[in-house]
Image: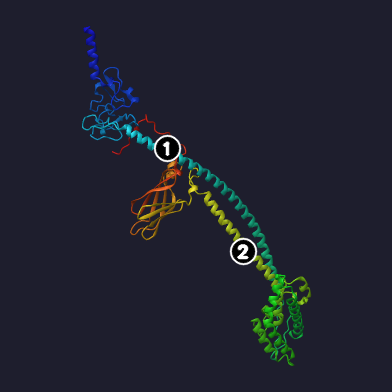
Amino acid sequence: MVGKASLSCILAAVLLVSPALSSNVKGVAPEKQALYQVSGNTWTCLDKSKTIPASAINDDYCDCPDGSDEPGTSACPNSVFYCENKGHIPSYIKSYRVNDGVCDPECCDGSDESSGLIKCDNICKEVGIQYRKHKAEMDAVLTSGVSTKKEWIEYGKSKMAELQIEKAKLEEQIAIMRTELGALEKIEEVAREKEQAARDSAAPVTVVKTDSKCPPCKVSSDSAAFKISSLRNHIKTLQEEVDELLTILHDMKRDHNQNYHDMAVKTAISGYDEFLVDYDIIKTERQEDVDEENIVEQADDAQEEEQDFTNEVVEEDTDPVVKEAAQGNVVSRITSAFVTKLEKLLPAKVKEALPSILLNVDEAERLQQAASKASDAVREKRNDIGTKENDLNGVNGKLNKDYGRDLEWMKLENECFEKDEGEYVYSICIFGGAHQKSNRDGANTNLGSFEGYTGSADNSSPEYYNKQLYSRGTKCWNGPERSVKAVFECGAKTEILEVTEPEKCEYQFKMRSPAVCPLIATKGEDETEARVIHEEL
């Protein structure tokens, strides 16, 4: 019996002097307890650098270079202490914080303070309840944000597909319009050539100078209609033909059906009324010229009257290039202009009754009108092409824009958000600009325009899109240009949380948005897995 009692005492003594043989070593996580079990009286440091007595573990003296022999004391500054935190999440703290007289929140069970300097209550149950409640709220936000982000991604893909279709459509339209422009330019070129050829082939007016006051005028022309060979021989004939035209128009004005609104007839009657205002005076003056016995002596006066109605001066000296208005007398010129205006508007029966000479409009004038219409068509087509090209540039700009890895930012383009901070209201429009508006006087200050993403140097990293820079704002007095750094975190909706000014005129907008929520939600921290506390020493 004595032998058995002595053996029991010896084993008890060994247990007392060899803490490494106990079931748990203080400061060591359950999954690492096996590293501190020994066979014999020695133990090897975890970095294999040296072997020490088993009794040296947690003896408040640092023996191992890696500090692994003092997991439960503050002896080794490079070691860590494990807090079990039952009812909450286990964690690690730096060993120098063990028994320092401060209840560390990371060790809610108070296990880091066992020296008696201070008593730390175990509050892990309460902390765990609050943590799980907050985590449930954040999980809901994450779920909502991810769902919204997926919708935005689908929106971005749909819009991009539409833009591709629109681009192809615009490119096809522009190609067709350029072909049409080429044809119109060819028509314009031909019309201009015909116009010039008609003008070049027209015989010039020859004014024969004699000793008399009013020399007889000799006019030669390829067009018998308007190139009157002799003013004296044709003035009477033309006068009669004009009178015949006026009679027809007078009868048409008198007899037309007022209840039938024929625009051609109404236009003809309107032109007729305007012409009559001056024509009676012209007719009287021309009749006086015809009745004069000596038409040569009256020629100077007739020429002055013609100049009053035509505003065209015919030089006395022979000139090879004479203006078109000088090719005939004033009556034929006014009549030609009047009939030209009415030719396309008069009904067919009225035109058939008109003297053929009055409807023979000058060919050069017709060709000039045709050339002008061709030029207008070319100009209009070029303007249409320019408009389409501007539209295409806008589409290409959107197609080449960085809307995020999955086009999630496209939905937010030009969407604006505000935050009232008391003295100022801050606003930001995504991909647009940021502003500061005074609540006192309404003054609006430009804080900058979108420059790019700055979350990471690597644009393939998810963090790359978490920050945006808005730069080149209004310059501060005696300072830099204003700028904004928008920092985003996952949220159920896009909003500004707070605005700060870390440096003069450099603002930081803390924001939330579904756009930065991770699509693959990371598994929540296992409450049995310890968290490593990262600290700055």
In the displayed structure, 471 sits above or below 344; it is above
Q: Residue furthest top?
A: 1
Q: Residues within 10 Å of mark 2 (few under 14, many from 20)?
A: some
Is 127 placed above or below 160 here?
Answer: above
Q: Amino acid at mark 1?
A: Asp
Residue 67 appears in which quarter of the rendering?
A: top left
Image side of residue 233 versus residue 514, left or right: right
Q: Quadrant of the C terminus?
A: top left
- What numbered label is drawn on residue 464? none
Disc 2 marks which amino acid? Arg
The residue lying at 38 percent from left, 36 percent from top is: 133
Query: Furthest residue to the front?
Result: 259
Q: Which residue is mark 1?
A: 139
Check the picture and name the quadrant holding the N terminus: top left
**Residue 327 image offset from top left, x and y in percent:** 70, 80
Horizontal and vertical percent position of residue 307: 65, 84
Residue of label 2: 379
